[in-house]
Amino acid sequence: MLKLTTTEITTKTTTETSTLTTESTTAAETNTGVETSTRVKAQTTSATTETTTLATTSVTPETTTVIPETTTTTTAATETTTSTTRVSTTPTTTTPWTAPAIFYPFGAAAGDKIHLEINGDSYQLVAFSTPFTYFNRTYNSIYINNNGLLSFSRPIPEAHPPSPFPIHGIEDLIAPLWTDLDDLGIGIYSYQQYTNGSVLTRATQDINQYFPGRGFTASWVFVATWDYVLTWDMNTFNQHLGPAITFQAVFISGDGFSFILMHYGDCAGEIYSVQAGYDTIGSTDYYQIHYNPTDGYSIPILKNTTNVGVPGRWAFLVNNGTETVIGVQMKLKSFLDLTQSGNIEVVLDQIKRELVNRGLPSGVGMKLRKVKKVQP
């Protein structure tokens, strides 16, 4: 009876071993997938159980034959697991949009006052906390127009650029990017003023880097930013996923000086005429950064343009400080002939150093009005 049992077990084990080998080979050759591998795994359990019986009764060394086949079947099961793990369950993530590093802080995180624009012609009148002098004319407020234009005397939200600067008009205009933004998609324009803090520190450093020798210290900064996404879907706009047009104007003043920075991020090409730069009453002072009378397909280049060596940034001195004339009387002992070229600059520099040591700002400038050579 024992022999009969042993024979049945051995025969069955051998048969299932052959089946396992065949099915394993079939799975490798035909790549039948998860179903074939599942059958192999189920039979492996059966084969393993019967192998245990053989080992317990010590009937035959045929156990040695079953063990390698079990190893082969395990390999097939392992391959099934590997195939299953190729299906990714990791959710797709989107990197949050960030403005270029050259931009000053803006938006809700900076505490800006924000206006949402959806296909409309709008503007905001902003009262300055500190008067701003623009080419010798001082203003206490400004109009921020939705179309990328800043104007002092009246709002101009609906107009396209009429002609390239200089216009020779009757208004002072500042155009970071003057175009028909509201017809392109959803956007915001926002603004903020600063009279202390890190923004003033940053402005002071920037101006002294681009306009050295003045010993400038910023006392007021005004930041206006336009950020439009070329879409009419609010979700796309909120996530900043579509093509965008983002730019900024920064007014900086202190010590009688006034400066303007213009910043350009991604600017998607668009169909309307564009103008970038500034102009003054009668165009006594003006500058054109970019102009196209037919369309704005060329504006993507703006983020690579500059006049200060920083791509996307333009810097302008728009008021050269206040000039105070003082009289200085002194006696000089020198063998220099001050009427000769170069000698007077040496003397003026020495006078400036003495005046700074006595309390005048380091940005004070010395100009020669008259020099007369007399005999002792």
Image (tube, helix red, strand yellow):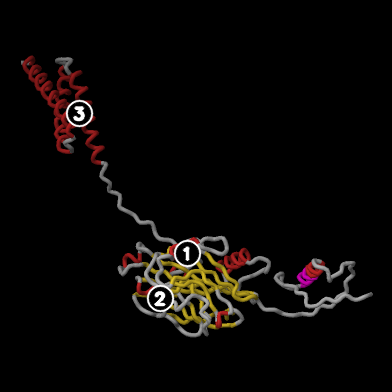
Badge 3: how crowded within 10 Å, few (<14), some, or many (20+)? many
Magenta stretch: residue 354 in it?
yes
- Magenta-colored segment: predominant secondary structure: helix
Residue 180 seen from this side = yes
Instruction: Answer with the quarter of the image where residue 244 lies.
Output: bottom left
Mark before the other along the chain sequence, 2 or 1: 2
Q: Amino acid at mark 2?
A: His
Check disc 3 and report the residue beneath it: 73
Mark before the other along the chain sequence, 2 or 3: 3
Q: Which residues are magenta?
A: 351-358
Q: In this view of the protein, which residue sits in the foreground, 99 or 155?
A: 155
Cβ–Cβ below 8 Å for labels 2 and 1?
no
Viewport quadrant of the C terminus: bottom right
Cβ–Cβ below 8 Å for labels 2 and 3?
no
Q: Position of residue 275 (x, y in %)?
A: 46, 72
Mark before the other along the chain sequence, 1 or 3: 3
Whether residue 325 is situated above or below residue 303 in the rendered picture: below
Q: Position of residue 204 (x, y in %)?
A: 61, 67
> Secondary structure under badge 2?
strand
Check disc 2 and report the residue beneath it: 115
> Secondary structure under badge 1?
helix
Residue 111 seen from this side = no
Badge 1: how crowded within 10 Å, few (<14), some, or many (20+)? many
Check disc 1 and report the residue beneath it: 302
Instruction: Answer with the quarter of the image where residue 157 lies.
Output: bottom left
Residue appearing at x 78%, y 75% in the figure: 368
Badge 2: how crowded within 10 Å, few (<14), some, or many (20+)? some
